Image (cartoon, rainbow, N blue to C red):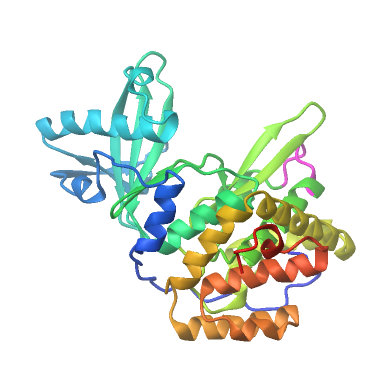
Amino acid sequence: MADATIRDEPPPATQKKPTYPVSPGLRGYLRTYKRERDLPVTYERLRGFSEVVPLTDADGKPTLWDTVIYDGEEMRALNEALKEVYAVLKVNGDMSVVQHLYADRVDFCTFGNSMPFRIRIVNAYNDNQDYFYVKKADASRIYGLELEHLLSPNRLNFLTHGATLIEEHVAGIPGDIFIKSWLNRPELSPIRVAKELVKFNERCFVRLLGDMRSYNFVFVVTPDFEDVQVRIRAMDFDQQSYNGRRNFYRPQFFKENAAFALYCIKVLHVETANQYLREEHTLMLQRAELAASRLGLLLDEMERDPISPPEKVHQLRESLAEHYGRPDYRSCESMGALVRENLESIRRHVGRPALSELVPHIR
């Protein structure tokens, strides 16, 4: 969104992406950093529901979710098992502090690649609610979650267990709702909103997180003593480093985000947008330096993992070589290598040390 004009057509609709298995190398990485855990619930176990009831919203309108029902004995067993999963996700498995919680509802969504289950956890003392998700473990999604954890300002809790992925709920106002109900509110500073849009756009591009249409990210709005702070968080990582089109990784070019792109053009000077872009580059590289060893190991595994067809990798590397003016991209044979090369490209502009200088064994 740093561009002064919209210079390209929006990318075409997302094609169905295959689910990639978790490789032994990635599994080892997940164990090292306590992401892989033994859990009492799997995705396949949750598929054993016996009834489905369409779920409506507060206005009685249908949603993309169905509430699923299990037989009585299985539901009682699942309540304890899901509570245990929540305890591992939130308090490292300490069951003593979650005895007053219960699994109030299990919802299922057939929309999208992951076909997730959403678990609503309720506090019996005060009716406070929280959610987490159970999905099929997909290697590219896991790389997306971990890159978000390491390179963005947002920390993410997630767990894997064999072919099952557990994700915490990302709270916020979905981008499409923000456009309709929040974008022009007087209490929000237009400059702050536009700044966050520019920074989010660039984070997605550098780390190759695709398909960030307005309904795939949320706005976190926090009142401050003199103003209102805004932060944007991705909440769908299915399209991490898969597509071959460069602009698929730039949210500004999706028609669903046109209101945001026009908003930034109206509010920001090009020079100011470029300033914010460089600020985000510097912050990303600082985060990369702090997690240099872990990030290096992750990118090593990502380079070895075929999470996108070679023709898509080659298409994207040519486009990125042209964008950054660096022929080094043409030697990249994987999406992991392209993410590493993107970090190197912004490092050259900002003047930060390379990862290989911080951790010698990392290329």
- Report if residue 14 is visible in the image: no
What's the residue at 16%, 44% (across, down)?
49
Residue 129, by quadrant, is top left
Q: Position of residue 56 (x, y in %)?
A: 35, 41
Q: Position of residue 54 (x, y in %)?
A: 27, 45
What's the residue at 55%, 85% (across, down)?
315
Of residues 228 and 150, the one nearer the viewer is 150
> In the orientation shown, which residue stands out farthest toward the front?
360
What's the residue at 76%, 65% (across, down)?
347
Magenta highlight: main SS: loop
Relative vertical location of residue 308 with respect to residue 115 in this rendering, above or below: below
Q: Quadrant of the C terminus?
A: bottom right
- Report if residue 33 is visible in the image: yes
In the figure, is residue 255 to the left or right of 73?
A: right
Of residues 202 and 251, the one nearer the viewer is 202
Residue 224, by quadrant, is top right
Q: Which residue range is magenta in the image? A: 184-190
What's the residue at 79%, 69% (across, down)?
348
Residue 277, by quadrant, is bottom right
Q: Quadrant of the N terminus?
A: bottom right
